Amino acid sequence: MTQYLRTGPQTMFFFNSTKDVNAHCHDRSAKLVTLDLSEYNDCKLEREDQQFMVGLHPWNTVDDEMYDTFDILSTAITDPRVVGIGEVGIDPLHGASVERQEQLLRYQLRVANEARLPVMFHIVRRYDILIKLFKELKPVASWAVHGFRSSPEVASQLADLGIYMSIGLKFNPETLKAIPRNLILLETDELPDSAIRDVITAVAQVRGRSRRVVSRVARENLRRFLNSGQKSL
């Protein structure tokens, strides 16, 4: 098994204030930015308090240069600014065949396990594959599904495995009510990082909680998700 040596401690800079936290965001001004592997080398760190999740998006699995990106992954996971793998996953509507996507996903999940990094997933319809891989690979760090809008039944299946569900502005209210409090993450995805305030407000209304409570719970859950692979925990 390959052992990946991280070059420094994983400090979660975005927990150093009481501001709202964003679990999944492509806005380059955010403190935690999700990057496709093809973007990693070109990304310039403009602020010291910025960190990344990196991975091969399933939409990009037909790229002729995708094998080069796995060399980038091996480098990226030794960077202490990289705090997770994502977004990765399965999307039968885009990219390579589902079989090929699963093969590429397995590789990234093995790397995540060896580096003890949490994983953020992009899953369209194929939750059966996600659940199968979880049971087979037994991840050492937590998994989360971004932009979760599936049914309450699927939410219950994921919750039984301890998989986090990340909620954006578009969500199924009944599903949101079914997600355990300790497994909810909040995100803006392609929207500006500042839109996390609107997400918190919308979630608070559906859950019947104050905005302050929802923000605090999201912060605690994201901290636990990102720290889940650390050996000291």
Image (cartoon, rainbow, N blue to C red):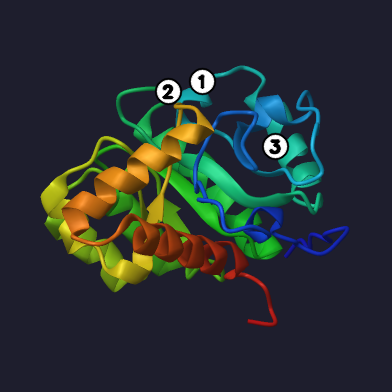
Q: Residue at x 57, y 28 (%)?
A: 27
Q: Residue at x 35, y 59 (%)?
A: 214
Circle 3 residues within 10 Å: few <14, some 14–19, many ≥20: some
User: Dot 3: what SS?
Assistant: helix
User: How far from the left and from the top, in percent, is residue 17?
Assistant: 64, 57
Number of the label disc, if any, that sits on residue 161: none
Q: Which of 109/143 is in front?
A: 143
Q: Is the C-beta separation of discs 1 and 2 under 8 Å? A: yes
User: How far from the left and from the top, in percent, is residue 106?
Assistant: 52, 50
Residue annotated with mark 1 = 62
Split into 4 quadrants, where in the image is the N terminus?
bottom right
Residue annotated with mark 3 = 70
Residue annotated with mark 2 = 95
How many numbered discs? 3
Q: Residue at x 72, y 43 (%)?
A: 50
Q: Amino acid at mark 2?
A: Gly
Q: As drawn, which residue projects farthest toward the top?
A: 64
